[in-house]
Amino acid sequence: MSNLSWHTRVETPADIEPLRDITRAAFGRELEVDYLDAHRDHPIAWIPGLLFVATTPDDRPIAYALLTRCHVGDVPVLSLGPVAVIPEYQGGGAGGATIRAALAAAQTRSEPAMMVLGHKEYYPRFGFRQATEFGIHHPEYDGPHLMALALGDQTVPAGLLTYPVTA
């Protein structure tokens, strides 16, 4: 189902259970729901107001993108993930709409970069490049699926990438 003008908004408390359902539908396993909940419960990883939801016209959540905290060396940066879309809406732009909302919010902050671990064919369209080009590395994720995006004029930090929450 394609709709180039998906409504996006920040998550509300009423969205918590629907977002768990989206995660189950998109990933097909409870581990991903646990991962989402672990981010929400973590005092460093969770940043209120940085989970963006795409909805149907009747405000039913169908997709989301979460920005969390990670570090490159000792520099805090944002991390995009997870991004999830109900399968029947995949390929219709809802996931992209939530990513664009997240990017717009990220660019209003004074952070140097955003990280994403994801599909190397998908995320470059939003400006992400291989993290190694910036001197960012991770012992498990080095390679084309680990990407970084500069957020403005600041220098992107280099060093070891760490996440406060792991799967």
Image (cartoon, helix red, strand yellow):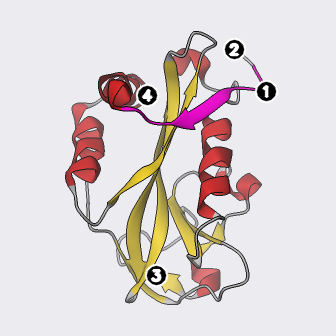
Mark 4 and mark 1 residues within 8 Å of each other at the beta carbon: no
Residue span colored magenta: 3-12
Q: Quadrant of residue 162?
A: bottom left
- Mark 3 and mark 2 lie on one chain; the one further toward the N terminus is 2
Front of the two marks 3 and 2: 2
How far apart are the two marked residues, 4 and 1, measured between alpha carbons? 20 Å
Query: Which of label 4 and label 1 is nearer to you?
Result: 1
Q: Position of residue 21 (x, y in %)?
A: 34, 22
- Nearest the eye: 145 or 59: 59
Determine if the magenta segment contains residue 98.
Answer: no
For residue 164, side relative to residue 6 (left or right): left
Q: Which residue is mark 3?
A: 137
Q: Which mark is residue 1?
A: 2
Q: Position of residue 134 (x, y in %)?
A: 62, 84
Query: Along the polypeptide, which appears first: circle 4 or circle 1?
Result: 1
View extreme (top): residue: 58
